[in-house]
Amino acid sequence: MSQPVPDITNEYVGIITTLRGLTVEVQIVGTRPDTKELLTVEGHPEVFLEVNFFRGSRAICLNLNNDSVVRCGQKVSRTHTKVSVPVGPATMGRVFNALGEPLDKAPGINENRRVISEPSGTRSYRNSQKLELLETGLKVIDFLTPFVKGRKIGVIGGAGVGKTVLTMEMIHNVTQSKGDGSEAKSLSIYCGVGERIREGNELYETLKDTDVLKNTVMFFGQMDATPAIRSMVGPAAATAAEYFRDEEGRDILFFVDNIYRHVQAMTELSTNLGLIPSEGGYSPMVFSDLRRLQDRLSSTEQGTITSVQAIYVPADDLSDPAVQAISQQLDSVLVLDRSIAEQGIRPAVNLLKTTSSLLTPSIVGERHYRLAERVQAIMQKYDSLKNIIAIVGENELSPADRTDYQNAKKLIQFFSQDFAVAEKFSGKPGEYFTLEQTLSGIEAILQGGAEGKKTGSDGSDEPPASETTKESTAA
């Protein structure tokens, strides 16, 4: 491990007495080190142990990279330093691990580093007077879970339903410059926790090919890393985001794939440390740690952090304690459904289970809000009619019920669209829909496929639907 440690003081602190997995117990004989301080092992300056907590006169440490050279009886010394990562303009376009080491074969950065375990301490603040909507070009997100600057949105789903691809598409769409200078102030930070190495490489190549990488900083602790490293990726990326927010006043787009893996890594560490788990097998300290991480991803008067977090659902169980704990800290939750994905619909969004506290008239406008109410009512009716149709058939429905049922099926298809990041696999070019196109398309469906429209569904004035809108509606 090449974690830079300047001015190391070889202060003998103790001797290793016990090894258990990643856990290393050190009998303290000198001055007690600080919590989270790195200790060096005699004869192996490349190996570092991080102090986690104390049990009497023993320091309970973590062997961060699970180095096999650690043995009982070895002497350890203090470094008076903690795990840190580089921050600032020099990190733009770069890829790092949780220890600040480069993963892109470029030179390491030893200047302007910050400790990842120490939040900036800047007071968070939410501007409720002026909320700025960010357009993603994805119909279902812009319509049901509005993307508001400075807030958090979650993408929930089981394995293989499209969380990573949807997150990549959002990065592609939101970070693309619109040519009017509107994106000049914002940058992206990507935090990859416990996901496949292949996915991280694909994302890196995609961002590089689309010229988005130059405005992105990436941190990875993938599934081959130890739980200690995976648990540090979130705080490492948050440290970089805090610097750009507080020191440079930037607006940050913070993407996490996958925040559940952070909880999972903390749970594995708890098991290694011998802590007693609570309900569901999760240690109580896991959720307090999750809360501290989420609190760091807040906005201040200097800048904003807008977060998109993919959330893996174990066994497709939305009632899992960890999934519930994560969801409670988000403003919007987009739920991906396996049964919808099996129909070939992408993104496979469950329109009924998807929720957002930001879908209010004061934020999205009266027209948008009323349309969302109507769509949700129709989808509720569609869900209740499915069982009836399975027994008696669609022809036995009343004309009004049949119309609503058909409209619901049209809406499900309408919210499906092709992704730009999947173009090389599907052969279909990506689609970008403005919010106006989305709203007009939904209005056309609810009015029975009308060719155009002069007024909004709530009676407000609205220009006629454009040819582009008609094409997108048909799609």
Image: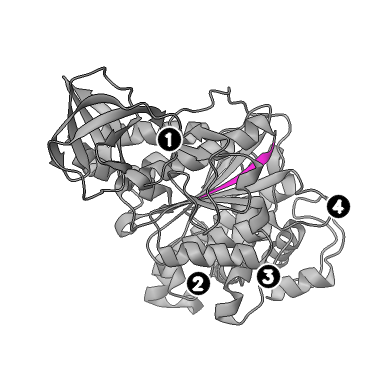
In the rendering, at what x and y percent does residue 27 appear?
16, 26
Label drawn at residue 461: 4
Q: Earlier in the sequence, mark 1 or mark 3?
A: 1
Q: What is the CA distance from the residue labelled 4 to the residue labelled 2? A: 35 Å
Q: Which residue is mark 2?
A: 397
Is 255 a magenta residue? yes
Amino acid tagged 3: Glu
Q: Give the amino acid type for the residue marked by disc 2 in the picture.
A: Leu
Residue matched to label 3: 431
Rate crowding at label 2 as few (under 14), some (14 to 19) or many (20 or more) other CA atoms within 10 Å: some
Three-letter amino acid code of the residue under disc 4: Asp
Q: Is residue 54 left or right of residue 91?
A: left
Q: Residue at horizontal 66%, vertical 47%?
A: 187
Q: Which portion, as a residue range, is magenta?
A: 250-256
Q: Are marks 1 and 2 in contact (CB under 8 Å)?
A: no
Q: Secondary structure at mark 4?
A: loop
Pick the front one: 342 or 385: 342
The vertical placement of 294 against 415, above or below, is above
Residue sitting nearer the eye, 407 or 27: 27
